[in-house]
Image (tube, rainbow, N blue to C red):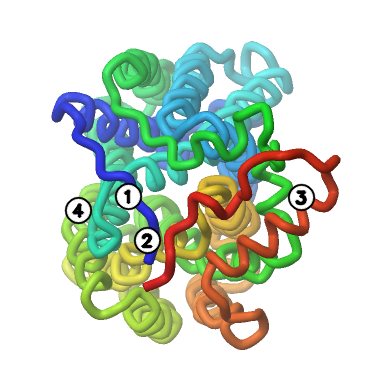
Amino acid sequence: MSTSTVVDEPWHSTVAGVMGNVLEWYDFALFGYFSDVIAQVFFPPSDNDDDDHANLVKSFCIFGGAFLMRPVGGLLIGYVGDKHGRKEALTKSLFMMAIPTTLMGCLPTYKTAGGWSIFLLVVCRLVQGVSVGGQLPASLVYTVEKRDPQQWGYYGSLPMVAANVGTLLGNLCGAFMRQVLSEEQLLSWGWRLPFFSGILIAAVALYLKATGADVHTTAGVYDSEDSAIKNPIRVALAKENRWALLSTALTPMLWASGFYVSFVWMAIFMDELNEPPVPGAFWINAVSMLLGMTFMLPIAGSMSDRVGRVPIMTCAGVGLAALGPVLLILISKGNPFLAFLSQFTLGVLLSFFGGPLCAWLVENFSPEVRLTSASLGYDLAHALVGGFSPAIATALYVNVGKYAPGLIYVVFGVISVFGLYVQHFCGDGIHWETRNKKAAEEAATEMPPQVGPDLTDNLPEIA
């Protein structure tokens, strides 16, 4: 059995926490939906389609660059959360998103600052990556640890829902700005407006910091003077924990790559790259995400509470690997109704993989290292494949062929399904309580002998 701390929290604090998650992902996703505009504003002007595509690949590379910082953010915010409490970690990550997002709306363009504009854009994006690398795991652990473990699948899916709502708002913003502004207005000043909303996150973070109930399941484990273990990172990286870390780094790869290909890159593909273009591409993308993911994630999470995480995720992973390339071919036909049905199907399959994923991540680790370990594994997956999947998809489209991006579903579908079982077949296959006891003992032997509580004193018994 997993441990949890059921906390009564004012409804307005809960709403503030959800809104913080929504706004953070709205800000983070904006870059992806304006990647085509950023490619024209922040890079040297091009004279032909090949240069346009090259600039788009560069823009997507900067989009992906933020993901390289996610493991750094996961370790930093995870360390804060495991040592000082989940709310402290969550509010710090929200503050870190507000400043760079707002500054992105103030950056000079390539026309006015040359290469410095690209440098400043990269810096802002990297800071965003640190923030979001800690925010989603912190939000996830903060949410589920307040609930009955028998409902972790459902409650674990809610941070994903909030992230999808934020991403959806970024999509709608991109569609709306293209609808009401001319291309000249969008390139001149219109692209700046959405980024100014980033300052709203700071207000939400302040409110959550003042009113939100804290969850500190590791109180006294690391922060007392006589604690044998002072650093959760040391325990998270211990030998006994490494198969679990590998599993949690491999398994999210399909979710990471599949989501950003299906609902960030796909909008640009349907609107800019595909011949013929899909009419109303951004609106189709938005409705598909709303119906196929935002509504389906809680259903998938709830089902995993009854059926189990691994069976549902295995079926969804195999389905994505088999059907992903076919659905991309159907989308490329240019028919809006066929594109909607195909993208909706991708969303449903992703939901049944991603909905149970959050609870599965949490259940792999004990409370003492849960946030640090889950953050590290999840963020490594996004750093390695998630952020760069739009750039990889564009490069495959340009250099291999129109349907080549569909291979992303196949490759990472196989890797992720293997990741679900790697600990069982290659590792020790034991419960986190036993594994963490060994990790704590190993870490403690590297510290000077001290009299203090055993790391595992606070761990629950296995029923």
- State which quadrant residue 9 falls in: top left
Q: Is residue 170 above or below residue 422?
A: above
Counting residues from the start of the chain, the first of labels 2 and 4 encountered is 4
Report how far apart the C-alphas of labels 1 and 2 lie in the structure.
8 Å
Amino acid bearing label 1: Val
- Looking at the figure, which quarter contains the N terminus? bottom left
x then y, percent, for residue 208 = 31, 21
The amino acid pointed to by label 3 is: Ala
Query: Which residue is denoted by mark 4 in the rendering?
Result: 290
Q: Closer to the N terminus: mark 4 or mark 1?
A: 1
Name the side, left or right, on which 36 lies relative to 286.
Answer: right
Crowd band around label 2 with a 10 angstrom C-alpha radius: few (<14), some (14–19), many (20+): many
- Image x and y of residue 278, in percent: 28, 59
**In the rendering, which numbered label is found on residue 359?**
2
Callouts 3 and 4 close, C-beta under 8 Å: no
The residue pinned by badge 3 equals: 444
Q: Badges 1 and 2: C-beta atoms under 8 Å apart?
A: yes
Q: Mark 1 or mark 2: which comes first in sequence?
A: 1
For disc 1, the marked residue is 144
Visible in this render: residue 140?
yes
1 and 3 marks in contact (CB < 8 Å): no
In the picture shown, does residue 315 fall above or below 228? below
Q: Is residue 33 above or below residue 335?
A: above
Question: Nearest the camera: 463 or 243?
Answer: 463
* Label 2 or label 3, whichever comes before in sequence order: 2
